[in-house]
Structures are given as C-alpha cells and as structure tokens.
Image (spheres, rainbow, N blue to C red):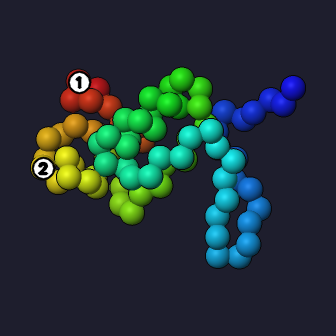
C-alpha cells in the first residue's frame, strides 16, 4: 500500500516544464473551478488548479462581480466566509 501525501507532489521534469502527481486537475480558476478544487481537496483529493490569473478572479462569473469567491485567506469561501 502506498501512502499518498496530503498535497499534489511536484515531480522532476524537463527544464521549462512542470509535472505534478495529483488526483484531480482543474483547468480554470474562476468561481466554478475554484469551488470544484476546494471541494475535491476537502474530500481528501490531491488537487492542482491551473489558471491564467488569480484563483476566483477569472471567468465570466468573476467578471460579473458577483462576489462568489473570496481568496484573502488562500482558500476560496462564499460570501459568509
């Protein structure tokens, strides 16, 4: 039995590239992608979230200014968090 680390593990890779060993890969850090990544991590998955911007600040919903995500603590939370 292999014990997996709590976080996605960065593996060695070719110069100029990055390689991770993870359970879940989320592409896009808008509100929906951020919530998927947080939910998967809360359930024990090792998650990598890849986005062109900051977590919770890209995508159509974020641009609409709904306030669906806040990332001040490093973890996305709803309006009550």
Compared across the picture, whether 50 is left or right of 21 comes to: left
Figure check: 35 above or below 43: below
Q: Residue 21 vs residue 51: left or right?
A: right
Q: Nearer the viewer, residue 27 or 71?
A: 27
Look at the picture and state if 54 lies above or below 22: below
Percent x, y for residue 28?
A: 39, 52
Point out residue 47 in the picture as x, y percentages from the top left corner: 56, 41
Mark 1, secondary structure of its residue: loop
Residue beneath the point at 69% across and 47% down: 21
Please state, as top left, top right, bottom left or bottom right, where the C terminus lies in the image: top left
- Residue for point 54% across, 46% down: 25
| Quadrant holding the N terminus | top right
- Mark 2 secondary-structure assignment: loop
Q: Are the residues at dot 1 and dot 2 in contact (C-beta closer than 8 Å)?
A: no
Please name the residue that numbered disc 2 is placed on: 64
Q: Would you place residue 80 above or below residue 22 in this image? A: above
Residue most toward the bottom? 15
Question: Front-most of 68 and 32?
Answer: 32
Using residue 74 as the reference point, say whether residue 70 is left or right of it: left
Q: Which residue reaches farthest right?
A: 1
Lower position in the chain sequence, tag 1 or tag 2: 2
- The structure residue drawn at horizontal position 64% and vertical position 76%, both measured from the top left corner, is 16
Name the residue beneath numbered marker 1. 80
Residue 73 in view, yes or no? no
- CA–CA distance between discs 1 and 2? 19 Å
């Amino acid at each position: 039995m292999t014990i997996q680390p709590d976080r996605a593990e960065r593996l060695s890779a070719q110069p100029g590239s990055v390689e991770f060993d993870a359970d879940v890969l989320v592409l896009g850090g808008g509100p929906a992608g951020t919530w998927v990544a947080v939910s998967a991590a809360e359930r024990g998955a090792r998650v990598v979230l890849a986005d062109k911007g900051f977590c919770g600040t890209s995508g159509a919903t974020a641009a609409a200014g709904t306030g669906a995500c806040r990332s001040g603590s490093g973890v996305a939370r709803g309006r009550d968090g």
